[in-house]
Image (cartoon, rainbow, N blue to C red):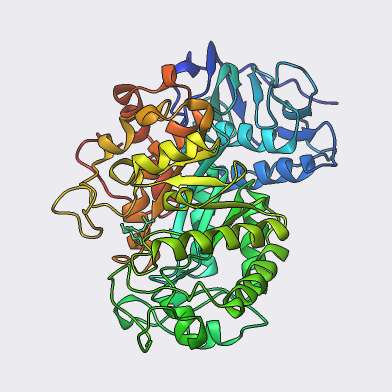
Amino acid sequence: TENKKPEINFPPTDLTVANMIPKPLKTIATNNAFGLDQFTAIYTSQTENGFAEVGQYLSDKINEVTKLNLLVNERSENSVDRIIYINQSDSTDLATNESYQLYITKDSAIINSKTAEGAFRAVQTFRQIIPETSNDTLAEQPIWPIPTGKIIDAPNFEYRGSMLDVARHFFSVEDVKKYIDLLAYYKYSILHLHLSDDQGWRIEIKSWPKLTEVGGSTEVGGEGGGFYTQEQYKEIVDYAAANYITIVPEIDMPGHTNAASVSYPFLNGNGKKVKLYEGTHVGFSTFDTRKDTVYAFIDDVVREISAITPGPYFHMGGDESHVTKKNDYIHFVNKVEKIVKKHRKRMIGWDEIVTADIDSEAVAQFWASKENADLAVKKGMKVILSPAKRAYLDMQYDSLSKHGLHWAAFVPVDSAYIWTPENYEGIPTENILGIEAPLWSETISNIDELEYLAFPRAIGHAELSWSTQENRDWDNYKVRLANQAPYLDRMDVKYYPSKLIDWK
Ligand code: TNX
């Protein structure tokens, strides 16, 4: 026989002022509380298609904050007083695979989504409204009161990305996984890896082993080097996939190719003798764009990387090819686009690529040239917004910042947030695939320094790309941002404690 537990009297709550980032589309408060505790269990309506894994992920993440061990899809021997139910639904109210509803009452928290991806995004919202500390006076057991109400949510842009430059300085698989964990919490969908540059080649290519043997041996400042074996790259891809993040691999060419040309000098097209480079200048290297062997090489590289990249994109770089003649550059981009297509990937390139005869399937990443962005639109292409003066995570916050550059601007936390991607500089919203915040690594060489530049600004970019324009407001955002501190501290994130924010 079971004793009925006494009702818990929660103080009133307000879901609409909860510290959720990105801010959901719609939030309605019902002012009661769901008492997350050891008598809570998780169920999923189906175990296939990734749903059971999302249930287990939620249980693991709840454990990280609360130390509770919530069972997933298992009959408990203890009494179960409350359930978290992840429900697959084909309701037409769920417009995209990432859309979800989260209904929280005193007794249950129900997630509705079409796909496990939508459930995964909902789970991030749920994580964000779990208090970091328990209430130990409401009942005999510790309880984490969660505000009740309804959340209806969907992404504003599908491409919500960050880029990590692992070429100027190499970052380990563990570092990349930690970055993925943090990005997932803020509903990012893309991690772009800048895998090659003048200072280093960072991914094993089995048919061209010297790329990593030679080209992978250096990094900026002579601090070492490194590369991912294909197995390690797959480990990153799988980890990202489990976090519903797509990896976009970039091999930057025809410029930014010194490390490749040192490994295989026939690739070099700048007429000079090549040697390993550990400085930070740009624009001095180029592939030889008129040699068939160069394209045979590129075909191998794109083939091997595409074979271990489940996502739809391949990024060919294409920026700052200052020593490639204009005609040679156009010829090169045209040829590479065909190679990328042959390997069934959709090509992305920095905005300069639009000067070639590119078709509308390719995507331009707008970082500097408005003229190129306009040309992309004219060609019917999609554009990824990475305007350096707003979205570059490697810009210094101000003149006192320990790390970073400032060639585009100083980018304080407010300036990174207060801009409007919709119709950005006249680019029609329907041409905008989303936003990407790139983190170049000339001035950072370890995870602490990475975190100093990325956080808190990357949190703002998450809201810019997920939340609608009506839901974005600096004064409201900065309060929610201040309240990220306990989470960031628990994750041991060495964020930059900007004075613009009243950190909790
Ligand atoms: C410009 S943005 C570059 C990178 C540098 C970055 C530093 C772009 C496409 N190219 O090579 O790392 O500035 O901020």
Locate residue 63, reporting x and y percent.
Answer: 61, 46
Q: Quadrant of the N terminus?
A: top right
Dividing the picture into quarters, in which one does residue 139 lie? top right
Q: Is residue 136 visible?
A: no
Instruction: Look at the picture and state if 292 lies above or below 152.
Output: below
Instruction: Look at the picture and state if 344 lies above or below 479.
Output: below
Q: Quadrant of the C terminus?
A: top left
Instruction: Look at the picture and state if 184 lies above or below 423.
Output: below
Q: Is residue 280 left or right of residue 347?
A: left
Ligand 1: quadrant of the figure: bottom left
Q: In front: 252, or 17?
A: 252
- Residue depicted at x 66% and y 25%: 100
Locate residue 203, reporting x and y percent.
Answer: 57, 73
- Residue depicted at x 67% and y 52%: 311
- Residue depicted at x 72% and y 59%: 342
Q: In front: 260, or 142?
A: 260
Q: In front: 464, or 271?
A: 271
Instruction: Look at the picture and state if 417 lies above or below 69.
Output: above
Q: Is residue 275 visible?
A: yes
